[in-house]
Image (cartoon, grey):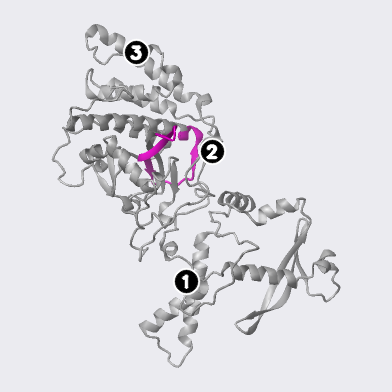
Amino acid sequence: MGLSKVRNMLEEMNKSYRRGSQHSGSSGVSSFSTQQSDNFDSEDKLFKLPSDAKMLRRARDVHTSIDFMALEAGPEHSGQGGPWQRVETSNRFVVFRRQVTVHADGNQLPGLEVMCAGRLDASLEEVASILRPTSEADFAGITQGLYPKSFVFGSLDRDVPCSGVPEEEPQSNNHEPAENPGVKACEYSEVSSSDSRGPVKVVDDDTSHSHAPLLVDFLAASLTNAPVGGADRVAVLAVVRTLLQHNEASDDSEYDDSYNDDDDGDEGFDCNQQNDNMALVELGTYLSDETLLPELADCVLANAERRTYHIDLPDDPATSVPSSVIPSHDSDRLEMIKDNGLLQLAYQLAPLKSIPDSFDNACDVRDLELLCQLAVRATGCSEAFVTVMGVKHNHILAATHPAFCHAAVPRQQTMCQHTILTSKPFVASHPEADVRFHQIEAVKLLRIRYYVGFPVTVKFDDNNSSSEMPVGTLCCIDSNARSELTRSQYATMKRLTDAASRLIQLKGRQVQQQLDPKLVSKPDFPMAA
């Protein structure tokens, strides 16, 4: 059943309850205060979920009340006039029903039980795995298989253990509704089964489509249009060289041995141009090589299973965003940002105060802007950004849209704050229907329906092993929702993010040298930019 139908049903139930409460009582006219009370009471009754202890007790009561020995022969053999009546037959299954009496609040109410009997060619373990999924991925896969056309998306609410459940505590009449008001405040009108079926995931590519030529053609056109010896040409070559460094075979290539930034003569120009063209061809081969793509099982997303952190919802989730999600390693992350000059770089390019009239004297980010252009072509999104997450703001270093350049966005107003929690990519489909994002200003103003963020990381030694610390993001947004990322898109975005990491660390050291000329640049990265 679609979410819109569920919401309509609940609204009709609320209306029916209110109509009934208005006709009951001594007065035919309800005041504003009594109408509010009726609404709260109806929502309380509608949305209060039973505790684990009550659910387990209900299951055990049902189990003890059923005569399984009598059912073994089949309901149809219970004799004429028996309690079970055949309703319909579908393939090898028969649906039965019977009238029962339900006890509720000391009253006996008429009820109806439905039973399906038939033959199922499966083991008990297989049936249990279908009827009792234990993870979000299992639930989504099973539900999608059972209801391929009508399943939109769902969530595994809880797993009630059969032992160790505490006794149910007595509840007062003033308990809060179990449904989170933030869930009701979200917008679900655009959510459909075609673009939100199951959790976000990485899938195999369509063999007939490759985005590698789009990237190479864009770089080739940028190189052709860039003036010889100009900053634009240097930026393109810096991006090409940085991307090729991920290809181990390119370390000893003719391009790397013969390329020289300082060779500006006419005689050397033809040689350099030939080497530049060779580098583009080599990059196209590298990006198109399917043997270099990671295995599908290795393309892991941070939110594929479930959210692993708590959300501190505001008092009014219909108008405010949740508080910032601060990871336990954030102090170490901020220290690493400062040590690498990235915080100074962020304040220079996206200052919090005293915004200058011009950024001509700031660090050149044309290479980062090129990475953003490549990212939108790789993902098919409309906009892309390179950011550094500071203490309370996300500093946008480069963007495809000039209006976002040099902006410092409050941390709680970003989806990137969730990307830097781990070193894995983060994908959000339909953020307008997510309690974490639906009140973010950019989501509302830009109608963001899809977000994919890859953490920009800095490597460090942790107990004699190499680890990565997220310091920022390379992220893309789009107004068209989707819940899939292809394997080649995953690999390309990872390569672009690694290139962004190298380039911003190089720029961070350049900013440190500007502030303190005594610092010597470390030889970890080539000075191509």
Q: Which residues are magenta?
A: 461-490
Q: Main secondary structure of the magenta part?
A: strand
Mark 3 lies on a secondary structure that is: helix
Disc with the residue nearer the chain's start (1 vs 2): 1
The alpha-carbon separation of the residues under discs 1 and 3 comes to: 68 Å
Q: Nearer the viewer, residue 244 or 323?
A: 323
Q: Residue furthest bottom?
A: 26
Q: x, y (%) of residue 335? A: 31, 41
Q: Is residue 194 above or below residue 63?
A: above
Q: x, y (%) of residue 177? A: 47, 71
Q: Is residue 243 left or right of residue 179?
A: left
CB atoms of marks 1 and 3 within 8 Å: no
Give the residue pinned by disc 2: 203
Q: Is residue 387 visible?
A: no
Q: Is residue 358 above or below residue 166?
A: above
Q: Nearer the viewer, mark 1 or mark 3?
A: 1
Give the residue pinned by disc 1: 177
Give the residue pinned by disc 3: 275
Q: Residue at x 52, y 64 (%)?
A: 6
Disc with the residue nearer the chain's start (1 vs 3): 1
Q: x, y (%) of residue 80? A: 85, 74
Mark 2 lies on a secondary structure that is: strand
User: Where, by quadrant of the figure, is residue 365 drawn?
Assistant: top left
Q: Residue at x 16, y 44 (%)?
A: 355
| Amino acid at the residue labelled 1 | Pro
